[in-house]
Image (tube, helix red, strand yellow):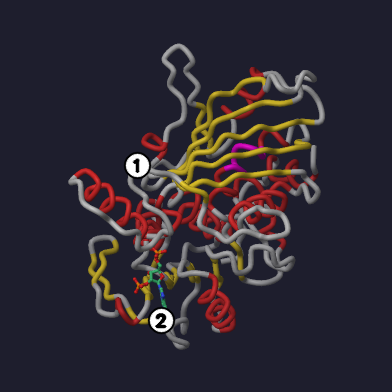
């Protein structure tokens, strides 16, 4: 068993914070699709928030959002936004994270960054708490990277398998929802679909291609050397980091599909030794953050419509990959909420784990 995974599976009992001191929490990107879910997760999980500071662009300054029944006014992000902040969630893109993340840390805050800015920085831990939460107890800095949504969702399913049988090859195809491209892409899916049903033209505005009744390759740019797009390369690199498998051969094809907020993916996984379907099912059934949905008789398997709004990642269609006669490969189908486990929930779980580790 890889050491990192053995450690995360045998997580020590959390250290209790001496006093659950309410924290001053900031959300950068509070008006976005992930921002709304961050507010919801903090509320629902009863995170000890004393003051919540909602930050966005100057366009949204003055907008009123609600937290625990209290109206809060959104402020424009600026360099003084982090004074007195204990914890800042960033979800407004990599450029702003690069600029303001270090300022927040310098002002004394812990930062959980949902952008790609620091995910491959060797000094910044990239964390999915169920997979490698132990890193939070050991880190030196105060900035934690929240993984790409596909990587986070795939990792919670792959880690419990990798902990028992080393994964030696990974192939994935994704079916990614609009939410991954933000609130404006979700609105575009609704509007483009309504227009198509009304027989009206709808020129794409946020995404590059017509979205209604269509699907297309992920909009991230293509790397001319490999032919993979930026999203595929991110997912492959981040999964290697999360699983502690630096050399894992992996190949992903990332596709945007017209669903609103839950990603799905087909994974084909080869292990160093044979794994039976029954073994995989039992390991996945016992894993934190995973729910097996694998009813062959009813043909009922993971679906975005059932994954949305759920904290757990759904996994099913667990079967031996017939293209690998060695019996060492399994195929799986997975669905997980992009805005929850793929973003806001994972970020709040990181903050909870920091608190349990006595860091925050
Ligand atoms: P705003 O709504 O004011 O544009 P999404 O990923 O759903 O598109 O959301 C992006 C988030 O990032 C929004 O909250 C957006 O705020 C915020 N944002 C975009 N540009 C800036 C900026 N220059 N300063 C602060 N927040 C920004």
Is most of the magenta stretch helix, strand or loop?
helix
Residue sitting nearer the eye, 89 or 169: 169
Secondary element at tag 2 = loop
Q: How much space separates mark 1 and mark 2, taking CA atoms?
A: 37 Å
Residue that sits furthest to the bottom in the current view: 80
The residue carrying mark 2 is: 77
Label 2 CB, ligand 1: below 8 Å? yes
| The residue stretch that appears in magenta | 154-159
Secondary element at tag 1 = loop
Name the quarter showing ligand 1.
bottom left
Q: Residue at x 57, y 27 (%)?
A: 285
Direction from residue 140 to residue 302 in the image, left or right: left
Expressed as whole percent of the image width and height from the top left, the position of residue 336 reads: 47, 41
Expressed as whole percent of the image width and height from the top left, the position of residue 81 reads: 43, 83
Mark earlier in primary sequence (1, 2): 2
Quadrant of the rendering where the N terminus is positioned: top right
Identify the mark at residue 83; answer none if there is no mark: none
| Residue depth check, mark 1 versus mark 2: number of the one nearer the observer | 1
Residue sitting nearer the eye, 60 or 231: 231
Question: Circle 2: is it few (<14), some (14-19), or many (20+) Cα within 10 Å?
Answer: many
Q: Residue at x 47, y 43 (%)?
A: 263
Direction from residue 190 to residue 121 in the image, left or right: right
Please tell me whether residue 238 belongs to the stretch shown in magenta.
no
Asked if residue 291 is positioned above or below residue 97 in the image, the reply reads: above
Please tell me whether residue 158 belongs to the stretch shown in magenta.
yes
Expressed as whole percent of the image width and height from the top left, the position of residue 130 reads: 60, 45
The residue carrying mark 1 is: 213
Expressed as whole percent of the image width and height from the top left, the position of residue 220 reads: 55, 59
Q: Residue at x 33, y 80 (%)?
A: 75
Asked if residue 227 is positioned above or below residue 116 in the image, the reply reads: above
Direction from residue 270 to residue 50 in the image, left or right: left
């Amino acid at each position: 068993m890889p050491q990192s995974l053995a450690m995360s599976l045998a997580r020590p009992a959390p250290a209790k914070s001496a006093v659950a001191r309410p924290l001053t929490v900031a959300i950068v990107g509070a008006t976005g699709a992930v921002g709304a879910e961050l507010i919801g997760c903090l509320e629902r999980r009863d995170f000890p928030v004393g003051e919540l500071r909602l930050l966005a662009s100057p366009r949204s300054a003055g907008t009123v959002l609600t937290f625990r029944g209290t109206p809060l006014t959104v402020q424009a992000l600026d360099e003084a936004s982090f004074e007195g902040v204990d914890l800042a969630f960033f979800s407004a893109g990599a450029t702003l994270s690069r600029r303001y993340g270090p300022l927040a840390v310098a002002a004394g805050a812990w930062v959980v960054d949902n952008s790609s800015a620091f995910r491959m920085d060797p000094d910044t831990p990239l964390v999915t708490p169920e997979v490698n939460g132990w890193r939070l107890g050991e880190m030196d800095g105060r900035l934690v990277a929240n993984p790409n949504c596909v990587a986070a969702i795939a990792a919670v399913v792959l880690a419990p398998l990798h902990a028992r049988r080393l994964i030696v090859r990974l192939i994935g195809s994704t079916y990614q929802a609009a939410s991954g491209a933000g609130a404006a892409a979700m609105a575009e899916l609704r509007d483009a679909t309504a227009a198509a049903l009304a027989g009206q033209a709808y020129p794409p505005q946020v995404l590059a291609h017509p979205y209604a009744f269509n699907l297309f390759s992920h909009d991230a740019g293509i790397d001319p050397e490999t032919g993979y797009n930026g999203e595929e390369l991110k997912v492959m690199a981040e999964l290697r980091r999360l699983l502690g498998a630096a050399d894992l051969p992996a190949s992903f094809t990332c596709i945007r599909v017209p669903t609103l907020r839950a990603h799905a993916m087909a994974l084909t996984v080869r292990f160093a030794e044979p794994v039976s379907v029954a073994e995989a099912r039992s390991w996945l059934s016992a894993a934190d953050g995973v729910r097996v949905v694998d009813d062959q008789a009813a043909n009922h398997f993971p679906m975005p419509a059932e994954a949305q709004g759920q904290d757990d990642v759904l996994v099913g269609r667990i079967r031996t990959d017939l293209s690998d006669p060695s019996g060492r490969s399994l195929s799986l189908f997975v669905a997980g909420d992009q805005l929850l486990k793929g973003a806001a929930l994972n970020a709040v779980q990181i903050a909870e784990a920091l608190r349990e580790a006595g860091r925050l």
